[in-house]
Image (cartoon, helix red, strand yellow):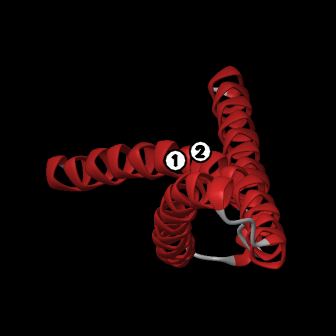
Amino acid sequence: MNIQLKQLDEANQAWQQYQQNQLVLLHDRLKLNDVDNLSFEDIVQQIENRFNDLNNQLIELENVKSKIFSFHTNQYYLFYRVETNVDVDRLQKQTNELQDVDTQTEDNEKYQSQEVCFFNYKNIFRIILFIDSKSKHCS
């Protein structure tokens, strides 16, 4: 009997350590707040909120991408127009705008890498929630 209790205690400790490690991963990778004191439903809500934030950032990135494409297209046509009629002030202004857009592009690439990570975690949580809901039906 004591051996079984000891084995159960060890299994319980291992499970608690696993859960703690998962909470640390959630906190570190998804930038969630105070997951130690939240219920499972609250953690899922934070993940959903984070997903929505990243989705909004993706929409912003798509808008910036569209602006960059438009800007580069305008630069291409401007190049041929400037050959015959040099407009230095306008060219300088557009060059400065292009540098600003390139800076935004670098920032946006960082957001995109975070988004890929988030989508991976979102799929993992969908699987966990599916398994959890199936296990409740089996009980």
Q: Nearer the viewer, residue 17 or 52?
A: 52
Q: In this view, does 99 lie to the left or right of 125?
A: right
> Residue sitting at 73 percent across and 52 percent down?
110
Q: How many labels, in total?
A: 2
Q: Is residue 131 left or right of residue 105?
A: left
Q: Distance between the residues labelled 1 and 2?
A: 6 Å
Kind of residue sitting beneath label 2: Cys
Q: Is mark 1 on a helix, strand or loop?
A: helix
Residue marked by disc 1:
121
Q: Is residue 52 left or right of residue 113?
A: left
Q: Which of 125 and 62 is in front in this view?
A: 62
Q: Is mark 2 on a helix, strand or loop?
A: helix
Kind of residue sitting beneath label 1: Tyr
Residue marked by disc 2:
117
| Rendering coords of residue 54 (x, y %) | 55, 67
Q: Is 113 rendered above or below residue 56?
A: above
> Residue sitting at 57 percent across and 52 percent down?
80
Q: Is 22 rendered above or below residue 105?
A: above
Q: Are marks 1 and 2 in contact (CB under 8 Å)?
A: yes
> Residue sitting at 53 percent across and 63 percent down?
74
Q: Which residue lies furthest to the top in this view?
A: 3
| Rendering coords of residue 132 (x, y %) | 32, 51
| Rendering coords of residue 15 (x, y %) | 65, 39
Quadrant (top left, top right, bottom left, bottom right) of the N terminus: top right
Residue 61 seen in the current view = yes
| Rendering coords of residue 84 (x, y %) | 64, 58
